[in-house]
Amino acid sequence: MDADLAALATAHGVATWYEDWRRERRDVSAESVTGVLGLLGVDATTPAAISTELAAVRERERLGRMPGTVVVRQGSGRDLPGPATIELEDGTTREATEVPGDLPLGWHRLLVGGQDITLVVVPTELPEPPQTWGWMLQLYALRSARSWGMGDLGDLREFLGVSGSPGLVLLNPLHAITPTLPVPSSPYSPSSRRFVNPLYLRIEDIPEYQRAEPAVRKKIDALRPETTGLIDYSAVWEAKRAALELLWPLAGAADTDLDEGLTDFARFCALAEEHGPNWRAWPAEYQRPDAPAVKAYESERIAFHAWLQRLLLDQLEAANREARERGMPAGVVHDLAVGIDPNGADGWLLQDVLAEGVHAGAPPDAFNQLGQDWGLAAWRPDRLIETGYAAYRDMLRRIFRYAGGLRVDHVAGLWRLWWVPPGMGPDGGTYVHYDPEAMLGILALEAHRAGAVVIGEDLGTVLPEVTEGLERMNMLGSAVLWFTRDDDDPDGGYLPAEKYPRNALASISTHDLPTAAGFLAGEQVKVRAELGQLAGPVEQERENAAKDRAQLLDALRAAGLVTAASTDAEIIVAMHEFLARTPCRFVTASLYDVLGELDQPNLPGTMDEYPNWRMPLKTGLEKIAEDPRVHAIARILGERKASR
């Protein structure tokens, strides 16, 4: 690669090479680097343009201007280029020639050298997480006799009471959809990560339903969709929307000025109902949230959608209250998707801090051999710095209002994220770097203020500093049985239970990987072969899967948990017993594993070829509450908690 192009890329945090999942160097093409620089507003299309951009970088360095945001750990100071005024979050001010080490945690202002800078003081670490166990739950899949086609927040509350006294329940993302049809199925491609999906409302628990006339309730009850087959999110939304519209007249007047951010989101929902789900296809006068036509837009639907979010917060708080009353130390833990649908609400509202045209994804690895293009928008790191990370902070604050903890999907994205330029495949992207001191520190600050735990999903191709950073901050990493191998074993066998990391959430699998029963049956090879998802020969993949199974059985036999005569059902119990012996702070079980489900919830790299996110558990909530397998696993993991 041209040296000047490489220097320009480095100056803007764009990788020109990376280590792949085998820890082998992979050089990035000049075309990919040029495309990603363009997404950052940097012209690298010609040698002359590269020279001009490099000159601009050197001029900024010569001027010695400070960045728009400065993040320091509590107890640490920082040199300043001259006399400064620090305006603290509480409104008091200090004169200083350096950032002092005794500043309180929080969001402050730094006025120095004619610059107005956001100064963030973040914790050095979070409190030590508790030692406990819990359930990983795809809430939409947990259907009951009272569900309207999919699991809801009422089902969650009921599950808390019949699931064997867990210390936490980790949910799939409950992020907001765009309230139009058809409703997309993936919880990891949301319209907004700052608000909540109204499909999870329990209609009968809404106060307006409870005080409605019997005739109205009867009419609403008749709207309940049939609970059969795959989950039909569009049918669920049509039914619940109709019910909510019948209840809306009973809601009374709403003050849409109390929460400007909520009102902006509700305005997007109203405009989407009128002009379609993709804001880029709206009339030009509505394509920016600060446009005069948008500010002048009036509709009763704005208040309607704001009301839905308040109902969701009430039901989420009811679940949190249930968790507290049951003594759950971590409570209900939510999941933060790595990005958003660029055509949705946050894509519209936050467009000034997002990279226009980028698709976030992942490079090729062992399980996704063609790479991944998630189609998600990504933060522009330079714009986050310029704007004081306000959008990132607001997102975290809103989630922590109703979360006892937060799992951060693809937590490595706080350090670097794989950007795929327009027109290129997922293997044609490269990494763009973020400031982990800011991204991780702000996450710690908002979690600290909420009294919440943080779990980072640090699986796959992850830099050592990611796991080290989580450890330093008392945030948990992830230890998945399928991936946790013994580096000292020349054959790559499984790590003994006692050698697992302490600062981790342990699980057998994840939503993107084979279930316990699927792993034992080699289902992951069968399905991926049928759908053309294998990069190599199917015979080789079958051989690899058979070797993995044999190595797992060796590890379980070495631990005295199985014999040659053990059935698959007994082996699945043994997997949980194995995890119960680890020192991991959190150990979790999934209903997919405990109930022997064969199909994994999501098959990365597929769209309509596989029913991603649409498969309910084959066992309903009422029978789950009585299932001896559920109680057996709860007892095994509960005894672990009691013995430590």
Image (cartoon, grey):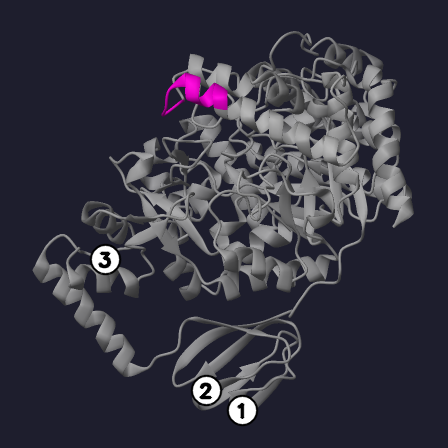
The structure residue drawn at horizontal position 67% and vertical position 57%, both measured from the top left corner, is 447
Camera-side residue: 574 or 367?
574
Q: Position of residue 616 (x, y in %)?
A: 66, 17
Secondary structure found at label 1 = strand
Q: CA gap, disc 2 to disc 1?
A: 9 Å
Camera-side residue: 487 or 257?
487
- Are the residues at dot 2 and dot 1 in contact (C-beta closer than 8 Å)? yes
How many C-alpha atoms fall within 10 Å of the one at disc 3: few (<14), some, or many (≥20)? some
Q: Amino acid at mark 1?
A: Ala
Q: Position of residue 380 (x, y in %)?
A: 38, 54
Pointer 1 residue: 96
Q: Amino acid at mark 2?
A: Leu
Q: Is residue 594 visible?
A: no
Q: Which range is magenta?
A: 534-543
Q: Is residue 536 magenta?
A: yes
The structure residue drawn at horizontal position 42% and vertical position 37%, both measured from the top left corner, is 365
Q: From this view, report whether residue 124 is shown above or below residue 162.
A: below
Judged left or right of residue 217, residue 359 is left
Q: CA gap, disc 3 to disc 2?
A: 29 Å
Pointer 3 residue: 42
Q: Amino acid at mark 3?
A: Val
Q: Position of residue 333 (x, y in %)?
A: 71, 43
How many C-alpha atoms fall within 10 Å of the one at disc 1: few (<14), some, or many (≥20)? some
Q: CA gap, disc 1 to disc 3?
A: 36 Å
Secondary structure found at label 2 = strand
The structure residue drawn at horizontal position 65% and vertical position 69%, both measured from the top left corner, is 123
Q: Main secondary structure of the magenta part?
A: helix
Residue 644's disc number: none
